[in-house]
């Protein structure tokens, strides 16, 4: 199936799961689809969006009770974030599985703008066997990431291939580029292949948030095994 939203302006996505205080969205599978937004440079355009009734790139879009979602074997492209799942501390998203997807495109104009997979308050998630590539950003000093987790404890990131992430905003100090950017605890990060992660601001005097990093983590009780990183 081809699922495409041609809108290039405003707040839009190709697939949207809504979870509100009154009603969530659970036990859903998104599989074997080509999923495309309309503009990789628009901060409010997403391939797959899990949130509330408001589509936005800030925390106002956090939803409720979107649980047991499987996103598998899809090609996701032409969006600011490939997959964005934003919950909140009062109602997390449980048991999200993102497996065997391609996120990005060899054609830069159809690739992903800034983050391949972006999760917030999604504990016990499994992100595995995905190919995330050709994320290239020059429009602002925002950091780019292949996979980004916030407050998503006890999750697994394994067997992913992440390459060709370029943050090329040339005005000092620029922005960082991270293969995996994980701000959560008790994670398993294993057997990932990460290479060609580039920022134009690498320097001994630059802040650490503005450099190229294969795996950037905060939190405790981390298990990091057998990853291959070649910046």
Image (cartoon, helix red, strand yellow):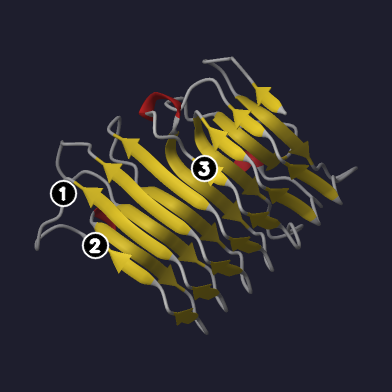
* Labels 2 and 3 touching (C-beta < 8 A): no
Whole-Å distance between the Cαs marked 2 and 3?
26 Å
Label 1's element?
loop
Q: Which residue is mark 1?
A: 201
Q: Which residue is mark 2?
A: 208
Of the image marks 1 and 2, the number of the one nearer the N terminus: 1
Q: Which residue is mark 3?
A: 103
Q: Position of residue 13 (x, y in %)?
A: 63, 28
User: Is 179 or 103 nearer to us in this picture?
Assistant: 103
Q: Is residue 58 visible?
A: no
Q: Position of residue 205 (x, y in %)?
A: 9, 61
The residue furthest right is 22
Q: Position of residue 67 (x, y in %)?
A: 80, 55
Whole-Å distance between the Cαs marked 3 and 1?
25 Å
Label 2's element?
helix
Q: Is residue 33 left or right of residue 137?
A: right
Residue 192 in the image: above or below residue 168: below
Residue 30 in the image: above or below residue 42: below
**Is label 3 or label 1 in front?**
3
Q: Measuring 33% from the left and 46% from the top, which residue is drawn there?
A: 165
Of the image marks 3 and 1, the number of the one nearer the N terminus: 3
Q: Is residue 148 left or right of residue 169?
A: right
Q: Residues within 10 Å of mark 2 (few under 14, many from 20)?
A: few
Q: Which quarter of the figure has residue 52?
A: top right
Q: Measuring 22% from the left and 48% from the top, which residue is drawn there?
A: 199
Q: Quadrant of the N terminus?
A: top right
Residue 206 in the image: above or below residue 137: below
Whole-Å distance between the Cαs marked 1 and 2?
10 Å
Q: Measuring 55% from the left and 66% from the top, which residue is drawn there?
A: 157
């Amino acid at each position: 199936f081809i699922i495409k939203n041609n809108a290039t302006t405003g707040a839009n996505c190709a697939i949207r799961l809504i979870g509100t205080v009154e009603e969530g969205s659970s036990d859903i599978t998104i599989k074997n689809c080509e999923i495309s937004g309309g503009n990789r440079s628009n901060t409010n355009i997403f391939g797959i969006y899990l949130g509330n009734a408001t589509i936005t790139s800030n925390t106002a879009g956090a939803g409720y009770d979107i649980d047991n979602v499987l996103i598998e074997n899809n090609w996701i492209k032409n969006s600011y974030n490939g997959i964005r799942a934003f919950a909140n501390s009062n109602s997390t998203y449980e048991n999200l599985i993102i497996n065997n997807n391609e996120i990005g495109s060899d054609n830069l104009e159809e690739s992903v703008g800034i983050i391949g997979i972006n999760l917030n308050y999604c504990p016990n998630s499994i992100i595995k066997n995905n190919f995330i590539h050709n994320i290239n950003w020059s429009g602002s000093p925002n950091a780019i990431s292949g996979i980004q987790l916030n407050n998503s404890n006890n999750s697994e990131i394994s067997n992913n291939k992440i390459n060709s992430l370029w943050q090329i905003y040339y005005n000092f100090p620029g922005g960082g580029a991270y293969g995996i950017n994980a701000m959560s605890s008790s994670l398993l990060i294993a057997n990932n292949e990460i290479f060609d992660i580039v920022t134009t601001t690498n320097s001994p005097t630059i802040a650490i948030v503005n450099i190229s990093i294969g795996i950037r983590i905060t939190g405790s009780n981390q298990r990091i095994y057998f990853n291959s990183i070649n910046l």
